[in-house]
Structure formats: C-alpha cells, structure tokens
Image: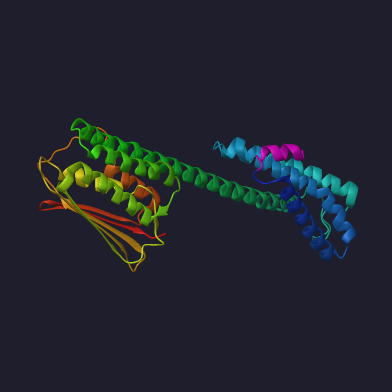
Amino acid sequence: MLNWISKTYNNQISLKYHLLFWVGYFMINFIRWGSYFDDYTYSLKSNLVEFPIHILLTYFNIFYLIPKFILKRKFLLYFVYLMIALATVYVVRTGLNYFLVTENIWPEAEGSQRAFSFNHILAVIIGELYVVALVTAIKLTADWITERTKNESLKQLQLQTELKYLKSQIQPHFFFNTLNNLYSLIIEKSEKASDVVLKLSEIMQYVLYDVKEPKIELFNEINYIHSYLELEELRHGNKVSSKIEIKGDIDNINIPPLLLLPFIENCFKHGTKNNDLINLNIYFENSKDEQLIFKAKNNFNLHNKIVEKHGIGIENIRRRLELLYKNKYLLETKIIGDTFNVLLKIPIL
C-alpha cells in the first residue's frame, strides 16, 4: 500500500511526510477526543479503528477518483462513486466501532442514538468529507507548487537556451564580417593584412574564451569594442573617426557579453558608401538611478541601401533585451538628419 502510494505520487511528496502528517493528525485527534470524553483509552481505540479508513478513503479519492473523473470533467460519475465510497466507509466504520470499541456508536451525541439513523449517517459522512477535503487540499496545493516550480525551471531553461543561441549567432556573424574585411585587404595586397590578423586573434580569444559567463565587466566589453574599432580603422584608414566617452564609475558594472557590438557594426554598415567619412561617437554613463546609459551616434547615408542576407543585429539585441530585462530596459533608434542615433538604458545588476 505504501509503495503504491509512493509510486503514484511520483515522489512529489516523500513517504516520510505522508507518515508525519498522519501520525501528527492521529495524535491531535487522540488528545482531542480523549480530553473531550476524559477517556483516552476509548479515544485510542476509536482512532485506531477509524484512521486506516480515513487513509484508504482519502488516497482512493486523490489517486483514483480525481484523476479518473474530475480531471476528465466527469463530475456526475465522481459524485456517484464518492457516495458509494462514503456509504461503504459508513458501514465498515460503524461495524468495526460497534464490535471492537463500544456499542454506543455515537457517544458525543445527546441521548441514545442508533446506527443507520439519518443524523448518525450525516455526522459520519461530514467527518469523512472533512478529512478527505483537508488531505485533498494539501495534495492539490503541493501539486500546484510542484507544477509552478517545474514551469519556472522549464522557462528558465528555455531562456538560457535561447540566450545561448542568440549569443552564438553574434560570434560567427562578427567573424564573417571581419574575414570579409581581411579578404579585401589581401586582395589589395595591403600591408595592413598582418595587423588585422593579429588584432583578430586577440578578439577571437575574447569571443571564444572570455564571454562564456552570462555577465562580463563593462570595462572588458569596452576594450572589445575598441579593438573592433581598431580593426575597422586598419581597413578604412583615415576614413574612420571614432571617439569613446565614459562618464561616472564603471568599474563594478557587469553586462551581458556581446550586447553592444551590433550597434557598432551598424555604424559601419550604414555609414559607408564610396569615400564617405565615418564619424562615430560612443558614450557610456553610470546614471544616478542605477542605470547604464549607452549612446552611439554616426553619420547615416540614406542612399546606402544594404541588403543583408542574414541580418541578426538590432533584432537580435531586442530579443536578448526582452529575455534579460523584460520591460525594464529602453532602446531607441532614430535617424535625425544625416545621423543615426542609438539610446540604450539597462538596469545595473
């Protein structure tokens, strides 16, 4: 019986807690009725007779009636079977009490009461329903907590999986662009190609080994952006003018890795056409309301229509921000005249 209960309950509540509950409930009833009648021997005998019946009925309801009828919305059949079970319990309980405990089957009632009278049947059934309702409520509450915990764990796992996928998209995307740049320099037989390879190896070490954690220091991310800018300057030469400005203390700020690079990449995608000069200003601020403010501003060529085969930049960032911060972030992108402006605010965690 106990093994069956343990398996059916799918280990949501361990067997020891079942035992602790019933032992505790038994002791409360034993002391209660022993004190009420001032007869602890009678209370012990009657509870020893009745508690196995309570246990059988409650588990029959929890593990058979509810799954078979309630969960399948067969409420009438549930009521019929429950009434049959209660009738059986009444007969068994009354008979055992009469033959094993006392012929006075209802000592707490006033006057002499006979078995199978309406009042006695009603009193016994209400008592059984009380026990069934109490235990069922505990079971359903435990199921609800277990299901909620499981759903939260699955949600968190899904979140982590999607974040890993989004982050993994950035790395090959970045290397694809950089290798294209390197290829162009090699075709041109530029002396800068060797410098690009050296700088690329430094960045590869960062991307492949240093960003495995969910959070990294903002200072490291800025260094990474600076290295990327140096790569672009090696490619474009004097056509690139960039400036990074930092306001406030950023030493203890951590952010998700590779979160800001797509903004910088976009500056070069939309700011380059023929011999255009690329002006890029990047701004970081640790605000007083514990938010990190990131701004990027670059010249924007409205006639520069770039078709991306696998565009993952801003869309990728928005999805990551939604997963990481929900509605606690602000991302605005605006074209003002011939400049493209990005404003990002995220909470400092």
Say whether residue 243 is left or right of residue 112. Answer: left
Q: Nearer the viewer, residue 230 or 126?
A: 230
Say whether residue 126 is left or right of residue 264. Answer: right
| Residue 137 in view | yes
Which of the image's four quarters has the C terminus?
bottom left
Image point 36% across, 44% down: which residue? 202
Say whether residue 342 is left or right of residue 84. Answer: left
- Give the magenta-colored segment's residue range: 1-11
| Above or below, 37 relative to 64 | below
Q: Nearer the viewer, residue 179 or 261?
A: 179
| Above or below, 300 relative to 186 | below
Q: Position of residue 320 (x, y in %)?
A: 36, 46
Image point 40% across, 43% down: which residue? 205
Image point 71% across, 40% down: which residue? 6
Which residue is the extreme one toward the front?
191
| Above or below, 113 relative to 93 | below
The verdict on residue 170 being magenta is no
Q: Nearer the viewer, residue 317 or 49?
A: 317
Q: Quadrant of residue 42?
A: bottom right
The verdict on residue 5 being magenta is yes
Which of the image's four quarters has the N terminus?
top right
Q: Position of residue 105 (x, y in %)?
A: 84, 53
Q: Position of residue 117 (x, y in %)?
A: 77, 50
Q: Position of residue 147 (x, y in %)?
A: 55, 45
Image point 24% across, 32% down: which residue? 183
| Residue 260 in view | no
Q: Nearer the viewer, residue 206 or 116?
A: 206
Colouring scheme, one of rainbow, by chain, secondary structure, one colour = rainbow
Q: Of helix, strand and loop, which mostly describes the magenta segment? A: helix
